[in-house]
Image (cartoon, coloured by chain):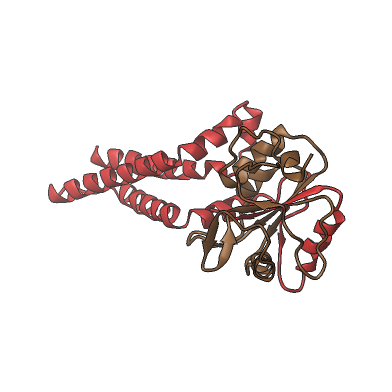
Amino acid sequence: MAAGKTIIASLGAMVTSLLTLGCCLPLTFLGAAGLAGASVFLSAARPWLLGLSVVLLVAGAFLVYRGMKCRARQGRIAVVLLCLAAVLVVLLLYFPQVLAGLLADISSQQKGPAGQPSLSSLTSENFEQLRTAFNKASGDVREVLLLSPT
Amino acid sequence: MCAKSYFFRRRDQHVCGGASAVRDVLKQNPNPHIRVFAVWEPILPTDYSSPGSGVLARLSDPRVEQYWDKNHLFAERLASRLKADEGHPQPTCCNRHGIQWDEVAVYGQEARWDSQLPRAIFFGWSCGSCA
């Protein structure tokens, strides 16, 4: 019974922590389901989801601890799932941008929104391309944004 | 119409909040004679890699071109331009270890980038005044 609760807590922690990446996953199916706003909602709810995943993780750990104290046999699946959930939550807490970027890009070859050129990595060798693009747009008002991905 | 109100048409609106704010401004302003160059650079400790598709999608307008500037090449050029020209408008926002970020620089229609960056009309996320 306790193993079942641990599994539920672990899966809950995994799901809620993965939902924090909702802003960054290719959730095209949500658009098809008329839920395109879900991505925006998930992005706004990120701190709450992360908090919930930590709470669920602690609850799962407590159940395992209590089971050990009572010398009850722990379900192997429950313990493995709890460990996996812990790893996932820690990764998402400390390296959210890396995971989000990886997951988002696994499914897409072209990095960048449709209708735009692909994201270009600037180096000393190709930096000229930014200058060329800037000058090519003379006649337009140009804005350069300096941004951090996170 | 001066360039900054050309872009920030709604002067009553205080535009803050980085890429999402710019997305909103672009949505409200369909003028095709606006080009945005979004230069993403690693600034915060969590900026381990180039932005993923989800981050890039914050600026999905076709008038935007996006770049990943791992070595802060643009920020360096901007800093040297600011240093060389005392009368240049000064950035209003964030500087971390000498690197400018979370900033918008607006350039007029006639601006041309030759050996040095041209003079920006203004910096910052707020609308300011054209007068």
- Residue B58 position within the rendered picture, expressed as x and y whole percent measured from the top left: 63, 43
Considering every residue shown, the one lying at the far bottom of the view is A125
Q: Colour of chain A?
A: red
Q: Is residue A60 above or below residue B72?
A: above
- In this orientation, does residue A68 appear? yes
Q: Is residue A21 above or below residue B95?
A: above
Q: Classify residue A3 as left or right of residue B84.
A: left
- Residue A90 position within the rendered picture, expressed as x and y whole percent measured from the top left: 39, 55
- In this orientation, does residue A26 appear? no
- Give me the residue at 70% from left, 58% from top: B67
Considering every residue shown, the one lying at the far left of the view is A70
- Give me the residue at 24% from left, 37% from top: A1
- Give me the residue at 48% from left, 41% from top: A19
Q: Which chain is brown?
A: B
- In this view, the residue in front, B42 or A42, is B42
Q: Quadrant of residue B71?
A: bottom right
- In this view, the residue in front, B95 or A85, is B95
Q: Classify residue A112 as left or right of residue A137.
A: left
- In this view, the residue in front, A68 or B111, is B111
- Give me the residue at 59% from left, 61% from top: B100
- In this view, the residue in front, A69 or A115, is A115
- Residue B59 position within the rendered picture, expressed as x and y whole percent measured from the top left: 67, 44
Q: Quadrant of residue B30?
A: top right
